[in-house]
Amino acid sequence: MKEINIRNRYLFLADMLICAVAYCASIFVAFPVSSFVPIITGCLPRICITALVYWIIFTACGMYKIDWVHASFQECINLAKASVAAFMISILLSIIAPDTHTYIKLNLVANCGSIAL
């Protein structure tokens, strides 16, 4: 059986897509369908900031340099640490940012969703 080789740049693109999908899913679940488009346009800057935070933290922690086919347990622990760090920074930024309380809740749910995916 041939081993699947996924380039790390594709993992990067998947991370960015997962951040966006997690936000859209949390908005879709929390609000009626009729208000989906206005809320998603209001959250667009937050989606970009969250994706940027995850990219910076994962790059700084070396997550895109790891050969995940042969990853050790320690590298999986490092992934968990990087995910928690990006989660905490993103939540902190949502608390500091001058937004409504609703967007803080959406950020929390979207970050939990992106970590779970």
Image (cartoon, helix red, strand yellow):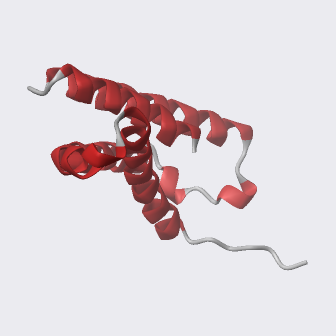
Q: Quadrant of residue 110?
A: top left
**Quadrant assignment for the C terminus:** top right
Q: Residue at x 45, y 61 (%)?
A: 12
| Residue 27 vs residue 94, the one in the foreground | 27
Farthest right residue? Answer: 1
Farthest left residue? Answer: 98
Seen in the picture, residue 43 relative to 112 is either above or below; the reply is below
Q: Residue at x 39, y 56 (%)?
A: 16
Q: Residue at x 72, y 60 (%)?
A: 69
**Quadrant assignment for the N terminus:** bottom right
Residue 30 visible within the image: yes
Q: Residue at x 25, y 44 (%)?
A: 35
Q: How many marks?
A: 0
Image location (x, y in percent) of residue 85 = 41, 29
Image location (x, y in percent) of residue 91 = 31, 26
Q: Quadrant of residue 107?
A: top left
In this rendering, position of residue 49 left or right of residue 57: left
Q: Quadrant of residue 23?
A: top left
In this rendering, position of residue 10 left or right of residue 72: left
Image location (x, y in percent) of residue 115 = 52, 38
In this rendering, position of residue 81 left or right of residue 94: right
Residue 52 visible within the image: no
